[in-house]
Image (cartoon, grey):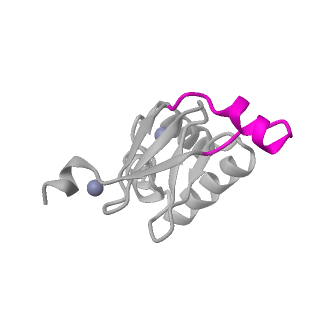
Amino acid sequence: MTKYRKRIYEIINTSCSHLNAYDVYEIIKKEMPDVVLATIYNNLNALVDEHMINKISIPGKIDHYDKLVKHDHLICSRCGKLIDFKFEDLTKNLESQAHVSIVGYDLKAFIICDECKNK
Ligand SMILES: [Zn+2]
Ligand SMILES: [Zn+2]
């Protein structure tokens, strides 16, 4: 694993916010000034391919990256803000409907966040 990949993995796994490639770039640049944005993208994508981090894609918004620990998301449909949330585990319910074993699922619930509500 390259020094960049290792550091990016650490950053994503210890962050509670959902960083995008620019956020990661800003952090890494302070530590390793030679880094370029393409390197950040390549390493983020490689980590996603290796199933070491999650990519959260929301149509019309920049991709965010997230740790693997299972949790769900509330997403503001106006500003795109992601809030970590843990819904009751739906695996059993999904399995009884689909009649197959569910190995994982990705649940996003859309909301209007307090900030947007007050605008
Ligand atoms: Zn919002
Ligand atoms: Zn999350």
Where is 7 relative to 111, above or below? above
Which of the 4 image quarters holds residue 20? bottom left
Magenta stretch holds residue 102: yes
Q: In the image, residue 11 lies at what x, y percent?
A: 48, 38
* Residue at the front extreme of this rendering: 97
Q: In the image, residue 25 lies at what x, y percent?
A: 44, 55
Where is 82 relative to 34, above or below? above
Q: Nearer the viewer, residue 11 or 98?
A: 98
Q: Nearer the viewer, residue 3 or 90?
A: 90
State the residue at coordinates (55%, 28%).
Answer: 88
Tell how many labels.
Answer: 0
Q: Is residue 23 visible?
A: yes
Q: In the image, residue 34 lies at what x, y percent?
A: 47, 57
Describe residue 117's horizontal placement relative to residue 65 as left or right: left
Q: Nearer the viewer, residue 56 or 93?
A: 93
Which of the 4 image quarters holds residue 91? top right
State the residue at coordinates (57%, 60%).
Answer: 41
Describe residue 114's horizontal placement relative to residue 90 as left or right: left
* Residue at the bottom extreme of this rendering: 60
Magenta stretch holds residue 119: no
Magenta residues span 87-106
State the residue at coordinates (67%, 47%).
Answer: 47
Q: Is residue 103 visible?
A: no
Q: In the image, residue 110 lies at what x, y percent?
A: 42, 53
- Quarter of the picture containing the C terminus is bottom left
* Residue at the left extreme of this rendering: 119
Label the magenta part by its dominant secondary structure. loop
Describe residue 52's horizontal placement relative to residue 13 as left or right: right
Q: Quadrant of ligand 1?
A: bottom left
Q: Nearer the viewer, residue 20 or 69?
A: 69
- Quarter of the picture containing the N terminus is top right
